[in-house]
Each structure stands twice: as structure tokens, then as C-alpha cells.
């Protein structure tokens, strides 16, 4: 049984084309998108492009380096259209700043999944919600074996991009095999990042914590429900286990898209949104995809000492749903002993329906409708005094960011330390997706917001000014998909949150997820 295409073939000639000149259909130039779609949710026009951008305003002369952003930018193969935002093949975008000038480029990441789809003109690996066609019992068994061995899992590294302490640049997703080395100058795919250890594991957190000295991540264990906390020293490919956390509740670990750290501790969240074996095996997606909602299994925060692997706390907390932790830090009592950990996240009021709201059909068809579920800065307090319960509250009035918020960054120098400012996408309602950029002041409990009607900005990424001493002394970079088929790189001042420069791309780029900054040495 072959699947019927869900939507008519799009105009964008994509798989296979490698032209460096943008070819923009006349209708798109006039701002009319095929099927009335927004550029944010329309597949990237071509495999690659690079060129200099004209800058309006002024790029600070100190901003010297490259901002890389990854995301799922291609949502169809031939005439087969993917369902979910997270299914798209990875599109890597770069903005290279030098002496006030800006050159940009984008290029598809050449994962095995992408190359096979291009060659065979069909889906060949399991993506976030898509499963390749199977026929009959034997292929069901084959599918099961492929899932258990990891052979059928995608390596489509579409979630983020990081720079390791030794300078290597890696695109990542939730599957371990989807760790792909790229050349940040050419955006060429170099090849798979091979972990030189025996840890195995098919999935990991999409958001490792990366510093100059180490890479920390979580490997969820679906067989013996728990998480291994692992560390890879900069300059090596070898992960070593720091320790293991057993799940407190239920038969499967919770989804760990991200996790927070403090100076001395790794925090392992155990969400009620759990991996689900039955849903992993299904060919057709459920509203919670590979997961299930199990609040009765409890919600927990575990705290592990980074140096020793000792579990120092494991507390029950109210149910929560988060993709992204913002930051965490240690609180001390009068004697200077660490008495609690504060961990902040983009929290969706324990409502997992946000996952299904990220279906492309919903994103494309509900523009302007107020269907974005509420979200807040959720602040956990995890006591380290032996208490069994932690708390979760709003860190500020969610109205300050339009009751929507996700896709956050901070000044990286404050990672794991007390901090004041978070940058995120927020909401100006009515909307079906975050459509503003917000700077949140967690001391004053206020915000500054940027909005361009009809536009969808991607994650605001804070870059600090070399030599700065104030936390918000720097710029915030975002890439914006405009409503009329235009797209631009946007630079906001970190302190005032006012626009200081923008530079138009030759054509709008789709929405992207996470980025990193590579400082020119
Ligand atoms: C883009 C993003 O934020 C998340 C992507 C998640 C992916 C690609 C998850 C893939 C998975 C499979 C292909 C099977 C196993 C489970 C799971 C990790 C959800
Ligand atoms: C786009 C997104 C999650 C991305 C994961 O990497 C969440 C958006 C939430 C909307 O409020
Ligand atoms: Fe993410």
C-alpha cells in the first residue's frame, strides 16, 4: 500500500538542486505563497545559497564571528508531505559577521536519512512522526528489529548545532546517530560524529551542556527505566558515565529534550510525558507521538553531583511539560552551604498538547487564530535538605510575554549561576505560534518585547560583547520569516532590546530551532 500525497506538489524545486542563485517564482516575489502558507512553514527553496547581505542600521564593530542556526527546513520528499515541524530535513544557516559586514549562507545537512530520501524519492528512516512504509507481518518484524537496533532510526540532525571545546562543530537531534560534524565555514557535512566508547544508547538529550572543557548529556534507558548522566571531555570522542538515575515512577523515562546544570550539579528532570514503547512501534502518529501522558507515575527532579555521580536529592514536583530549561543555579544558606537548586524552564502548564500544536497543518492553517496554549517561565525550587517535595511557580506574570514563551537563551557566562535575564520567543495574541521576541528580567519581573506584525522570529540568541561586565551587554540575534515572503536577520541591542540592524535575505528562510555562536579568534 503506498501512501497518497497529503497535499499538492509544492512549487519549490528542491531535492537534487544545488544552484547558488536564488530562483524565486514570480508569485512568491509578490508575497503570494503556494497554498497561502507562511514562509516559516514552507520548505527551504533550494539546497544551498551564500552571499553578502545589505545591512540596514549598524552592526557593532565588535561583533566578529559566526552565528549558526539549525532546524528542520525541508518538509517534503517528492510529492510526499511530512506532518510535523520536527520531521523536516535539517537546514543549517550561517550569519558571518566581520567588521560590520554580514555574509549569510544556508545548506542542507547531508544525513544518511536525507541522502537516502533524495536518492529513493521516499522516506527511508523513522523521523519524529513519520515512519517508512511497511508491508505485512515480516516487515513489521523487520521494523521492530530496525527500531531496537537503531538501524531504522533517523540521523536527521535537525534540532541544534554546537561547538565543542576543541572547536569541532556538530549538528544534533534526539538520536545518538544523528550527531553530524559540519564545517562551519562551508557548511559542508564532514560525516558522522563517532562516539568512541561502548555506551551504546539510541537516544540522548537534544540539548547537551557544552563548555570549553566538556560536553554533558543524558542517555535515557527505555529498558531499565532511568537515565545515564555522561560526560565527554573536550578533545575526545569518549563519553564516560558520571552516574545513573533510576526513574522514581512508572515503566518508562520521561522525555528529556533538555536538562539544566549548576556549578556542581546536573539536574535530571523526570516529566510525566514518558517515552512509550507502544507508540514507538506505531506506524501512524498519536497526538503525543512517541510519548504518553502519565501524571499518575509522578513528576520528579533528581540532582546529581557532577564530580562524584552521587545523587544528592530526588524530590517530587508538580506535573510539568517543558522542552527547554533556561538555566539553574545553587542557593546558599547563611553558612554558605548549598541549600537548594533553582531551575527555570519554558513550562507549558503541564499540557502536552503543545506537541500536537506543532503539526504543520495547524501551523499553516491557524495563522492569526488564538490557539497557542499558554506557557510561562516555570521556576523549580529543589531543596537539598532532605525534603521530599520541590515547588514549581511562575517566575513572573506570564502576561508580560503574552502567555506564550519558548526557545530561550541566556548570557552563556551565567550558565549554572545566578542570573537575571532570559531571552525567548513570546506571544502577541491572537497567534498560533510564538511571534515576538522577549527579554525577561527575572529580578524586576518585567519584560521588553519586539514584534513585527505577521512575522515569525526564531530563537533570540544572546551574544555578549567581549570584555563586557554587565549581563545584558551584547546583542540578540534572530532570523525572522516575514509574512510577505521576505526574511531577514535581526540584531537587537541586549540592553534596550531595540533593533540596531537588519539584513534581508534574498528569499525567506523557514523557521529554525537552535543556534550557537562561534567567536572569531
Ligand atoms: C526537532 C526536535 O526538536 C526533535 C526531534 C526529535 C526526533 C527526531 C525524535 C526522534 C525519535 C525517533 C525517530 C524514535 C525514537 C524516539 C524519538 C527520540 C522521539
Ligand atoms: C518550537 C518548539 C520546540 C522546539 C524544540 O526544539 C516549541 C515551541 C513552543 C511554542 O510555544
Ligand atoms: Fe530544543
Image (cartoon, rainbow, N blue to C red):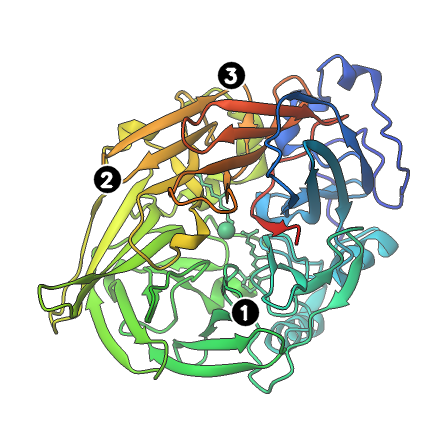
Position of residue 505 measured from the top left corner of the image (x, y, whole percent)? 72, 27
User: Which of the numbered marks, if any, corresponds to residue 443?
Assistant: 2
Quarter of the view holding residue 313? bottom left
Position of residue 374 measured from the top left corner of the image (x, y, whole percent)? 33, 35
Position of residue 430 measured from the top left corner of the image (x, y, whole percent)? 41, 20
Marks 2, 3: nearer the viewer: 2
Quarter of the view holding residue 436? top left
Quote the CA–CA distance across marks 2 and 1.
36 Å
Secondary structure beneath dot 3 equals loop
Secondary structure beneath dot 1 equals loop
Position of residue 247 measured from the top left corner of the image (x, y, whole percent)? 32, 74
Secondary structure beneath dot 2 equals loop
Q: Which residue is mark 1?
A: 203
Q: Kindly tell me whether residue 130 is visible in this rendering.
A: yes
Q: Kindly tell me whether residue 374 is visible in this rendering.
A: no
* Residue drawn where x is 51% and y is 83% of the image: 240
Instruction: Please identify the residue farthest to the left as the structure is shown.
Output: 334
Classify 237 as above or below 109. below
User: Which of the numbered marks, if any, corresponds to residue 453?
Assistant: 3
Looking at the image, tell me whether mark 2 or mark 3 is earlier in sequence order.
2
Q: Answer left or right for 419 relative to 65.
A: left
Looking at the image, tell me whether mark 3 or mark 1 is earlier in sequence order.
1
Queried on whether the Cβ of the residue with tag 1 lies below 8 angstroms from ligand 1, the answer reads: yes
Quote the CA–CA distance across marks 3 and 1.
38 Å
Q: Are marks 2 and 3 in contact (CB under 8 Å)?
A: no
Crowding near the residue tagged with mark 3, few <14, some 14–19, many ≥20 C-alpha atoms within 10 Å = few
Amino acid at each position: 500500500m503506498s501512501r497518497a500525497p497529503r497535499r499538492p506538489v509544492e512549487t519549490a524545486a528542491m531535492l537534487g538542486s544545488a544552484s547558488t542563485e536564488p530562483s524565486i517564482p514570480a508569485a512568491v516575489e509578490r508575497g503570494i505563497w503556494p497554498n497561502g502558507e507562511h514562509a516559516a512553514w514552507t520548505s527551504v527553496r533550494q539546497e544551498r545559497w551564500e552571499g553578502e547581505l545589505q545591512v540596514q542600521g549598524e552592526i557593532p564593530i565588535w561583533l566578529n564571528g559566526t552565528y549558526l542556526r539549525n532546524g528542520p527546513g525541508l518538509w517534503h520528499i517528492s510529492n510526499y508531505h511530512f506532518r510535523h515541524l520536527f520531521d523536516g530535513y535539517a537546514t543549517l544557516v550561517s550569519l558571518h559577521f566581520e567588521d560590520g559586514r554580514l555574509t549569510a549562507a544556508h545548506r542542507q545537512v547531508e544525513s544518511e536519512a536525507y541522502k537516502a530520501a533524495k536518492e529513493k524519492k521516499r522516506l527511508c528512516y523513522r523521523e519524529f512522526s513519520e515512519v517508512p512504509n511497511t508491508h505485512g507481518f515480516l516487515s513489521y518484524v523487520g521494523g521492530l528489529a530496525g527500531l531496537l537496533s537503531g538501524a531504522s532510526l533517523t540521523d536527521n540532525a535537525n534540532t541544534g548545532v554546537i561547538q565543542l571545546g576543541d572547536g569541532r562543530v556538530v549538528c544534533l537531534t534526539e538520536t545518538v546517530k544523528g550527531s553530524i560534524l559540519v564545517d562551519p565555514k562551508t557548511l559542508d557535512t564532514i560525516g558522522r560524529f563517532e562516539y568512541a566508547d561502548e555506551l551504546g544508547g539510541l537516544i540522548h538529550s537534544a540539548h547537551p551542556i557544552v563548555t570549553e572543557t566538556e560536553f554533558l548529556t543524558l542517555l535515557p534507558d527505555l529498558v531499565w527505566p532511568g537515565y545515564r548522566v555522561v560526560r565527554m571531555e573536550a578533545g575526545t570522542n569518549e563519553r564516560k558515565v558520571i552516574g545513573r538515575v533510576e526513574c522514581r515512577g512508572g515503566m518508562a523515562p520521561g522525555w528529556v529534550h533538555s536538562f539544566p546544570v549548576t556549578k556542581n550539579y546536573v539536574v535530571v528532570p523526570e516529566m510525566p510525558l514518558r517515552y512509550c514503547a507502544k507508540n514507538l512501534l506505531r506506524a501512524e502518529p498519536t497526538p503525543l507521538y512517541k510519548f504518553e501522558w502519565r501524571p499518575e507515575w509522578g513528576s520528579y527532579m533528581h540532582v546529581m553531583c557532577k564530580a562524584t555521580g552521587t545523587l544528592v536529592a530526588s524530590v517530587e514536583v508538580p506535573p510539568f511539560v517543558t522542552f527547554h530549561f533556561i538555566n539553574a543555579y545553587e542557593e546558599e544558606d547563611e553558612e554558605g552551604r548549598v541549600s537548594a537548586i533553582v531551575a527555570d524552564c519554558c513550562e507549558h502548564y503541564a499540557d502536552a498538547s503543545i506537541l500536537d500544536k506543532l503539526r504543520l497543518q495547524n501551523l499553516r492553517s491557524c495563522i492569526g487564530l488564538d490557539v497557542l496554549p499558554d506557557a510561562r517561565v516555570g521556576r523549580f525550587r529543589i531543596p537539598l535538605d532532605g525534603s521530599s517535595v520541590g515547588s514549581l511557580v511562575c517566575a513572573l506574570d506570564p502576561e508580560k510575554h503574552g502567555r506564550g514563551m519558548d526557545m530561550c537563551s541566556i548570557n552563556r557566562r551565567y550558565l549554572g549561576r545566578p542570573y537575571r535575564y532570559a531571552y525567548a520567543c513570546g506571544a502577541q495574541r491572537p497567534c498560533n505560534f510564538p511571534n515576538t521576541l522577549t527579554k525577561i528580567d527575572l529580578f524586576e519581573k518585567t519584560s521588553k518585547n519586539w514584534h513585527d506584525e505577521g512575522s515569525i522570529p526564531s530563537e533570540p540568541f544572546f551574544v555578549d560583547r567581549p570584555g563586557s561586565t554587565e549581563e545584558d551587554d551584547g546583542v540578540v540575534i534572530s532570523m525572522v520569516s516575514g509574512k510577505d515572503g521576505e526574511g531577514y536577520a535581526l540584531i537587537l541591542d541586549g540592553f534596550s532590546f531595540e533593533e540596531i540592524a537588519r539584513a534581508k535575505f534574498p528569499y525567506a528562510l523557514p523557521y529554525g530551532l537552535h543556534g550557537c555562536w562561534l567567536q572569531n579568534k
